[in-house]
Each structure stands twice: as C-alpha cells, then as structure tokens.
Amino acid sequence: MIEDLCIIMLTAGITSLLFKLFKQPVVLGYIVAGMLVGPYVMGESWINNAENAATWGEIGVLFLLFSLGLEFSFKKLLKVGSTAIIGAGVIVVGMMTAGMLTAYALGWDGMNALFLGGMLCMSSTTIVFKAIEEAGLRSHRFAGVCFGILIVEDLFAVVLMVLLSSIAVKNTFEGEELLWQVAKLVLYIALWFVLGITLIPTFLKKFKKYLNDETLTIFSIGLCLGMVLLAVQSGFSSALGAFVMGSVLAETIDAERIEHLVQPMKNIFGAIFFVSVGMMINPALLLQYWLPITIITLVVIVGQILFGSIGTLLSGQPLRVALQTGFSLVQIGEFAFIIANLGQNLKVTDSSLYPIVVAVSVITTFLTPYIMKLAYPTLAFLESHMSEETRKMLDSYTEKRKTNSSKKRATWARPAIRLMKMLLLHLAMAPGINTFLRLFNDNLYARERLAESKRGLEREIENSLLTLDLHIAEVEVSANSAFAGKALKDLGIRGKTGANIVRIIRGGININIPGGNHRLYPGDRVILAGSDTDVAAFQKMLETSLSNTDTDNNNTSIILDNFTIKADSPLCGKSIINSSIREKGNCIVMGLIRPLDDFYTNPDPNIIIQEDDIIIVAGEKQKMQEFFS
C-alpha cells in the first residue's frame, strides 16, 4: 500500500509540476499521472492494488465536496439575486437538453442520455476559479457573476446526484418518487442546517481558547465524516453528507480558518481522486470513440457560451459581462467525474461513457484559458455589427433589471429566514425554543456581521457606484511587493491606472479616502474604485512591482555602512540633529568614530560632526550612498 501511494504521489507531483511550468491546470497533470500509472499506457499497471487507489479516491471526493461546501453558503445563494439563479437556470436546462439530444443522436439509450445531460450542465468550479485567478481577472465584475452561477450549479449538482441515484435504481421516471426524493432531500438539508447552525458555532465559541489548529482540524473532519455516515444511513450519497457539513461550517466565523486547515488534505486526496480517474482512461478507447468525444466537446463549448451568455444577459447584465461569463464556463469538471462514477457504480451506463466524459473534460479544461480570451474580440464583432435599435433595447433592458434588482437586493434573504423561524415556532413549541431561536439567529448572522465590520466599502455606496459602471475591487499588498513602504503620492496610481484608492484596511483600522502621504504596508487591503480596465491596470502595476522586487532588494534592504566625512562635506560642522541625515538619507546614525579620540555608540544628537569623522549608519543602501556622496 505504501509503495502504491508513493508511486501515485511522486508521479502526480512530477506531472503537476510540468503542467504548472507550462501554465496548464494541475488537474490535467493528475489525470495524465493516472494514465501513466494505470494499466493501459505502459502495458501494465504500476499500482499493485487498484482498489486502494479507488478507496483513496472516494475519500478525495469527500474532501472535494467538503471544501466546496466550505466555499458555499445558503445565505450567499439567497443573496446572489436573480443574476445567478436565472443564469444557472438557463445553462442547466439548455445544456441538459443539449446533452440528452446529443446522446440520442449518437444512438445511446435513455439512461446514458440522462447521465450525459447531467454531466454537461455544470461547469468546473475549480477550473473556472483557477483560470480567472491566473488571468488576473478575479476582481472583474463578470467574475462575481461566474461565482454566483457556479454556486447555484453546485447546489443543483448535489440535488441531481440524489435524483439520478433514485432514477437509476428504479430505472424509470416516476413523478411521485421524484417529488418524494426532492422533499426528503430538502427536509434533510433544512434539518441539519438548522441544528448545525444552532449547535456547532455555539460549541466552537464556547471552546474557542482550546481549539488550536490541530484540534480544530480533527474536530472539523470528524464532523464531516459524521455527517457522511448520517447521509448514507438516511439513504443519500456520502458526497451529499460532506457537502452539507461543509455548508454548515461555512456559516461560522471560523469558516476561512477551517478551509485553510483542510486545504492540504483536500489537495492530497483530491490529487489521488483525479489520478484514479486517469487510471480508468484507455487511450485505445479514446481513439475508438473520437467522434462522440469531438461532438460532445463542441456541444459543451458552443452550448456553454450560448446558454451562459443568454442566461447572464436575461438576468440584466451588460453584453460585455454576459459574454465574459459565457466564455469562462466552457468546461466540465469534478461533478461530471462524480456523476460518471455514480453511473458506473450503479451499472446503468455504458463503460465507454466514463472515458469519453473524462476526455471531454480534459480537452475543454485545456482550452478554457484560450477561449476566455475570445470574449473581447467577440464583443467587438457584435458591437460593430449591432444595429442602434438593438443596442438601445439591450441598454434599456439592462438598466430596468439593474433598477429592480437594486431595490430587492437588501431584502432578498429575509423572507426565507423569516419562514424558517415561523416553521421553527410552529413545529417546536417547547420550553427553551426562544433560547434555541436566539442562538440560531445569532449564529446565522455572526459571520455576516464580522464581514460587514471589515467591509471595504459601505454596501450602499458600492451599489450606487455600480449604477455608474464603476467597480469596487479589493487587493492585498504582499510582503514582497515594491509598493510596501511607499507613499501613495510616489506611486502615482490614479495617473497611471485611472483607479482610485478609496480605503486602506490595516488590521482593524479603516483609512478612508487616504491622502498622498499615506503609505502602503505588507498585509494592507486596498479598496479600489474604477472600471474593469482601471482595476486591471492597477493589478498589472502591482504584479510588475512583484517581478522587480528581487532586483530592488539590493537597494531597499536595510544594511549597516560607514562613511568618512571630508572637509568639503555639507555635514562638516553641523550637529547630527541638524544634519538631516535621518530625513534626507533615510537612515539612522548608529555610531561615530573620531580619530585619536573615542568610539561613540548611539552618539548624542547634539554632537558636532568634524572632518575625518567616520559615521556608522543603518538604512537603505542606495539612499545612503546618494546622501553621503
């Protein structure tokens, strides 16, 4: 077993490093590693016991879904508004229909068609996040739209897995059975959401001082596996249990900390899962089924662009944002593998469907960064060929939807929360219910209150800026940025990028509308206001500062140096305090050596500097040399 794990991890590490080197998603590297260690490429499997790899892969699925749940929030789903719901709804219906029609056109039966439709209707959250981040577009307006749509798709995927399992077992479409499964699923999620939000954050708060990183990691994983067992015993999939517990913990104020702690295990077992996926790929089958692979790949790319753009446009977003969103969702990923694996385990899909879908996922994942770049040329083409009437109609529709959504945004989640409280009051009229409701209410909004206290800009101001086509973005100044320690007036950010810094968040302190003399320091969160172009220009400026840091370090690092005072030096005859050494040389006098006299450590500021004195100073090398030269 150790030998198998060693081979898997070393191969995955080497291939992922190569893919990272060539700026490709590491997920592809894991799949390639699986193909290499599997039985089809090298003639025989490098793995002695494939069942061990499959078991580790199943654990990987649990960690993937658990981490996905930690990034998910039911309140966030209620607050993303109509944009994400309409956009995801159009994509799911459109892609599921397109997938099923494609399967029927290829001569597949109904069950294979249903599973294929389910695999094609969800984009890869991991790949989209990675592609947007690596392209430096995380703070752009369309990125928020993409993430909202992905949240809705992830929730639908969990529901779909339950429904597909039921349909596969019954092998028929029974309306009553489907309604019962949906009702049971909703009841299960609602029950554990209410209990989890009420009890778990209260427990974490009570024992906060005892929960170091190690204890919190063990406790979180224990909760995850406990919910997995409850889900299986309730007739649901283990993946659903992991997702539900992740989404419950996502509502706690420790969510980011838990996500950070679980990340290494997610990376390890997630890599093993994708390696196990690659082990099932037979290149000979890929050659054999090249036609369906090509057709399905084209359906995914064209369909996601079409339905993603239309759905986002119908939700009231501008054409630019709609196209950027559609061109970013052109792949299938984790859930496609999980659904394909579900069909294989239930023995209701053909064995060829799994490698076909994996091949489509690999191709679309590889093409995603390149397809994303086509959004702007497509926008330019459409705008140049669009009639003035069509342009006015789109602008009018967008403005109308924006006005309506801004009115509803503040109260979007309230009806659902009130309904939940009313149900609790009617279903559990027992002593202590007020305490229970108070705990639930306090815990439900604890993370939200914390986030608002650290918010870069007041929500009302941010909403008003959006109507002016201005975008609010947040970036962090890293420790190795050349921006660190410099005054805003010296950086010239507004003149070079067009972006305006409206707030600097430093620890628990908010510096609103900072002046030119304010300096940036490592760890500062900078809140910008500007268009997507302005924000992108600032990010490029920040990245350039990072790339130049290594060469700048020779000049900006603090060193000790000594300088001999000559007769013609302007410092000669002046006291240290009046010499402007600290102000102009940006350094501190640490000592003074006077020939035939003595050595002064931390000399008195009033001591007069004389000819041939040797001054020992600490500061930045370049500025000291310029001052004393």
Image (cartoon, helix red, strand yellow):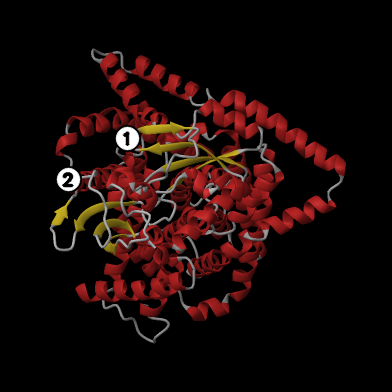
* In this picture, residue 458 sits left or right of residue 315: left
- Image point (44%, 69%), residue name: 20
User: Could you give the CA–CA distance between mark 2 and mark 1, rounded to whole angstroms?
Assistant: 16 Å
Quadrant, the C terminus:
bottom left
The one of 204 and 431 positioned closer to us in this rendering: 204
Report crowding for label 1: few under 14, some 14 to 19, many 20 or more residues within 10 A (C-alpha): many
Instruction: Find residue 587 and report its horizontal and vertical position in percent.
Output: 31, 52
Q: Visible in this render: residue 75?
A: no
Instruction: Find residue 527 and report its horizontal and vertical position in percent.
Output: 49, 39
Q: Earlier in the sequence, mark 2 or mark 1?
A: 2
Q: Visible in this render: residue 145?
A: yes
Image mark for residue 215: 2
The one of 82 and 41 positioned closer to us in this rendering: 82
Q: Amino acid at mark 2?
A: Thr
- Image point (63%, 73%), residue name: 291
* In this picture, residue 559 sits left or right of residue 129: left
Secondary element type, mark 1:
loop
Instruction: Find residue 414 and report its horizontal and vertical position in percent.
Output: 48, 22
Quadrant, the N terminus:
bottom left
Instruction: Find residue 141 and report its horizontal and vertical position in percent.
Output: 59, 44
Please, which residue is most extreme toward the bottom here? 43
Q: Amino acid at mark 1?
A: Thr
Is 142 above or below relative to 595?
Answer: above
The one of 292 and 256 positioned closer to us in this rendering: 256
Is 190 above or below relative to 290?
Answer: above
Is 366 above or below relative to 192?
Answer: below
Q: Which residue is mark 1?
A: 252
The one of 236 and 346 positioned closer to us in this rendering: 236
Secondary element type, mark 2:
helix
